[in-house]
Image: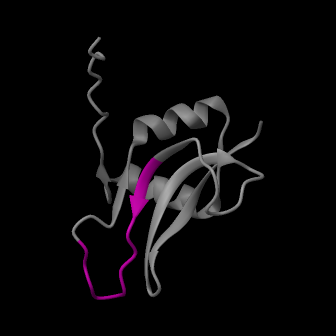
Amino acid sequence: MALKIRLQRHGAKGAPVFRMVVCEHTTRRDGKFVEILGTFHPSPRGQNTKKPLTVRLDRVDYWLKIGAKPSDTANTLIKQARKGLATVEAPAAVTPAAN
């Protein structure tokens, strides 16, 4: 099973929102995915959004170690996140399930 890290397009016409996901390389662009790694809100030049890029780098590192290959765009966004140009999400707190 070859895994890819790539972007899925969501949002309205003219106002895209992208999710960075891990999926199998044969799935459609907006098809099934294994895990959501972050979001990207592109903005027109001159306009700023509060959090244009949010990435969970710990999970990205895990999937890269497993063997997932990032697309060119996803790789560029990961590099930007590593430089500090993105909001890095903290890992979600794990709470034990109530029985």
Is residue 70 rendered to the left or right of residue 11?
right
Image quadrant where one finds the N terminus: top right
* Residue at 61% across, 62% down: 30
In this rendering, position of residue 85 left or right of residue 61: left
**Mainly helix, strand or loop, the magenta region?**
loop
Report x, y in % for residue 89. 30, 44
Observer-nearest of 68 and 80: 68
9 drawn magenta: no
Q: How many marks?
A: 0
Image quarter where the C terminus lies is top left
Q: Residue 53: where, in percent of width, then height?
A: 36, 61
Q: Residue at x 41, y 41 (%)?
A: 57
Residue furthest toward the left?
50
- Residue 72 drawn at (x, y percent): 63, 61
Is the residue 73 above or below the residue 90 in the image?
Answer: below
Q: Which image quadrant for residue 93?
A: top left
> Which residue does the image show at 47% across and 47% down from the upper left?
36
**Quick one: 71 or 7, which is closer to the camera?**
7
Segment colored magenta: 37-49
Q: Which of the colour schemes (rainbow, by chain, secondary structure, one colour) is used?
A: one colour
Image location (x, y in percent) of residue 9 = 53, 69
Up-down: is 83 above or below 95? below
Q: Nearer the viewer, residue 80 or 26?
A: 26
Quick check: 55 left or right of 18?
left
Above/below status of 32 relative to 15:
above
Give the residue drawn at x 49%, y 40%: 60
Q: Residue furthest top?
A: 99
| 40 vs 26: above or below | below
